[in-house]
Amino acid sequence: MAVRLIKKSWWVDLRFNHERIRKKSPENTRAGAQAFEAVLRQKLARGELIDRVTTIGDENQTFETFALRWFNEYVLPNNKYSERRIKKYTLHSSLVPFFGRMPIKDIKSYHVEQFKAQKVKEGLSPKTIKNHLTVLSKCLVCAYDWLDITAKPPAIHWPKCPPPETDYLSPDECALLLSHACGTVRELILMAIRTGMRQGELKGLQWSSIDWDNRVVIVRHSRCDREKALGAPKSNRTRSIPLDREVYEVLRRRKQSTGYVFENKYDRPLHHSWLTYYLDKLCEQSGLRRITWHTLRHTFATHLVMKGVPLNTVQELLGHSTIMMTMRYAHVAPSAKRQAIDLLNPNTQFPSDNFGQPVGNQWLTANVRPIITNEYEPKDPYAA
């Protein structure tokens, strides 16, 4: 009998003219697969052509052969340019040289550990090794699925990585940097510090994405310099960010109906090299350490957390896909731990009024309650 149960699905698996043919049964039962097998054999006997899902050599494909197919059929259609470039480099520089000649089904966890050991000897950081293993893992999962390999992909033990370090500017450093900036550069820096938008999102910001009535900017675009085109933001997550009074007034003074919000003197979209050059120049003039545009995004998030804004709110404003990405800023949040330790001081007689109250509740108390207790008539928050 040429019917098999594979991954909770019934398949017809037979040979014809020394060629292996596999097809999934339309009816997912043993009897349905047997009936489907009879139909296939009748078609073959009459000389009719049928699609062959896999051939006898598919399970023995080498990693190099499948990696090329995976890149063309999965990475190119589903990933952005920057991700495609990184995965292409990872495949050609690390994964294919090590796993290239091995059949997909023969790659075991032991070989993955050998790969990790080799990269450690080459001096790669745990984070870089983890990035390489992420590409390998996704490629192998697709291989086992596409080639209908009945076994499970090899288990991968991820290296432990230290928490990422984030640099940010203090309020005084922000004021110093802005005091030396002017024109479009100053507006960009102010926008980055007050909204946390990524560099690509700032370059791709359109006038049509600003809601003037509600005073919010809707982040729906990101500009890629290499493709010279607008795309979706990272993780394809559109988000809304309220504009504070200063940013709102800066934008309103030169409001337009369409086009890019920020352009160079030739009325063309900004480029990464232009932004980097002027930020480096400003850091030198103001006596600050060298920072990047992403440092301004970290500054936005850090200042919010230091003020007691809940992490889930910061996550929404930053557009993080998971709260774990936002947790890197948790260490700067004010906490009741300090007040608890202060109680050990014999000179402390009474706890503070907000002792024991979660930071998020303190922030809500300061921001939400006044709104609830206001009079029914709305007030303009930007009125003098």
Image (tube, rainbow, N blue to C red):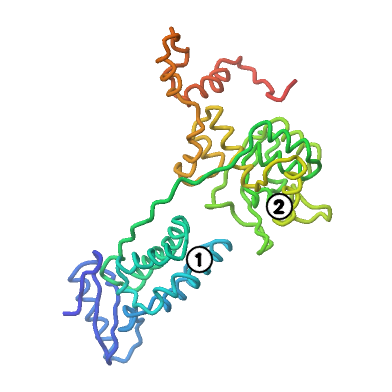
Judging by the rendered image, the residue that carries numbered circle 1 is 87
Judging by the rendered image, the residue that carries numbered circle 2 is 276
Does 212 sit left or right of 125 as displayed?
Answer: right
Q: Nearer the viewer, residue 143 or 162?
A: 162
Q: Residue at x 33, y 83 (%)?
A: 57
The spot of residue 110 in percent (x, y) is: 30, 67
Q: Single out the mark in the foreground, 2 or 1.
A: 2
The spot of residue 36 in percent (x, y) is: 24, 76
Q: Nearer the viewer, residue 362 or 145?
A: 362
The spot of residue 212 in percent (x, y) is: 70, 36
Q: Residue at x 35, y 67 (%)?
A: 114
For the view shown, which residue lies furthest in the top direction?
Answer: 349
Q: Secondary structure at mark 1?
A: helix
The spot of residue 170 in percent (x, y) is: 63, 33
The amino acid at mark 1 is Lys
Tell me if residue 168 comes above or below residue 46 in the rendering.
Answer: above
Tell me if residue 311 comes above or below residue 33 in the rendering.
Answer: above
Q: Which mark is residue 126?
A: none
The amino acid at mark 2 is Thr
- What's the distance in space between the residues labelled 2 and 1, CA to CA? 25 Å
Q: Residue at x 20, y 67 (%)?
A: 29
Q: Between disc 2 and disc 1, whose residue precedes?
A: 1
Tell me if residue 372 comes above or below residue 29 in the rendering.
Answer: above
Q: Quadrant of residue 55?
A: bottom left
Q: Nearer the viewer, residue 194 or 16?
A: 194
